[in-house]
Amino acid sequence: MSGTSKKAIYGAVIANVAIAISKFVAAFFTGSSTMLSEGIHSLVDTGNGALLLLGIKKSKKPADEDHPFGYGNEVYFWSFVVAVLIFALGGGIALYEGIEHILHPKEVKDGIWNYVVLVSAIIFEGTSLIIALKEFNKTRDGASFFKALTDTKDSSTAAVVIEDSAAVAGLVLALLSLIAGQVTGIVYFDGIGSVLIGLLLLSVSTFFALECKSLLIGEGLPGKEIQKIQNILSEDKNVVAYKKPLSLFFGPEEVLVNLNVNFKDGLVSDEIEKVVDRLENKIKKEIPSVNRIYIEAETIITKRTQANRK
């Protein structure tokens, strides 16, 4: 993972530390369950940022005898842990606090504390989100935001985008619930705001966990990248036939590609080696994330090969 991607995580961690402290202070003086839920949310986000940085560091460990393909999947594992923590700690506790304050409502005191903290937090979280989006947009390649988010293999940057988006949305919910409670005088709005924040976090974490699960199980290159490889094989005059390429992500920038290729009859070993080198160089140039390519020569009977043998 590049240093520019880690920039988004560092920005999120710094923002969340400051925001978490201010939210807990506001919750202490006002007794607001919404602010307490938001404080827990920011505290969880701070820990999540640290876990993502840990995952990035571990993923850079060189390959060894036990892990011949390296440790790139560490990023996906720790991203999954982050998703679980958002669900269990962020969403679960916020939901519990909200229900507790709906059943046993308390009047929010000194509301000015909450407004100052929430507006400041929206500014800080919004800034962190802008930084994360700038880094994320570099990899979108013209795709829509949602499609790019579901297709990306850089789970750590996606985690920051998802967390910061949820944080801004949660802050807006908290602000609206406090305003509603103050305007109407209905004390239940504070607990309702906390419940809504909990449901938001549970939804976000479920979505992110499913994305990480797909990468942990073993996800390959998208169809358009596979088509690029097939085009390279089809254009080579020494390739008679081939099976559909098999690929597997071992990290955001580490991809294994396996190819079964039928070379033109009559080629000697030196000539086949040159063809293999040429194919590997073209594929790596076209798809930079591919860093391991295994090409197996075999006989693949197709209409094309039968025609060539007549």
Image: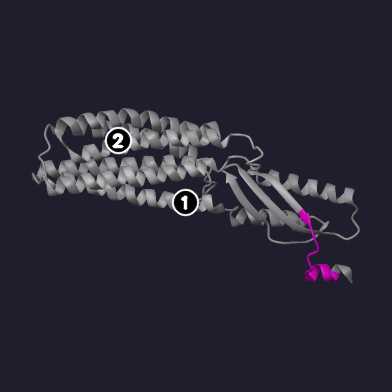
Residue 200 vs residue 229, the one in the foreground: 200
Residue located beneath label 1 in the image: 211
Look at the numbered discs 2 and 1 and tell me whether their residues touch, using CB distance below 8 Å. no
Q: Is residue 213 above or below residue 307?
A: above
Quadrant location, the C terminus: bottom right
Q: How is the image coloured?
A: one colour
Give the residue displayed 17% in from the left and 41% down from the top.
Answer: 178
Measured Cα–Cα span from mark 2 to mark 1: 27 Å
Total label count? 2
Magenta stretch encompasses residue 93: no
Checking the image for residue 122, the label placed there is 2
Upstream in sequence: badge 2 or badge 1: 2
* Neighbourhood count class around disc 2 (C-alpha, 10 Å): few under 14, some 14–19, many 20 upward: some
- Range of magenta residues: 296-307
Horizontal and vertical percent for residue 300?
78, 65
Element marked by disc 1: helix
Horizontal and vertical percent for residue 141?
55, 46
Magenta stretch encompasses residue 304: yes
Q: Is residue 32 visible?
A: yes
Element marked by disc 2: helix
Q: Is residue 144 visible?
A: no
Quadrant location, the N terminus: top right
**Left or right position of 108 against 287:** left
Residue 280 vs residue 77, the one in the foreground: 77
Give the residue displayed 34% in from the left and 29% down from the top.
Answer: 17
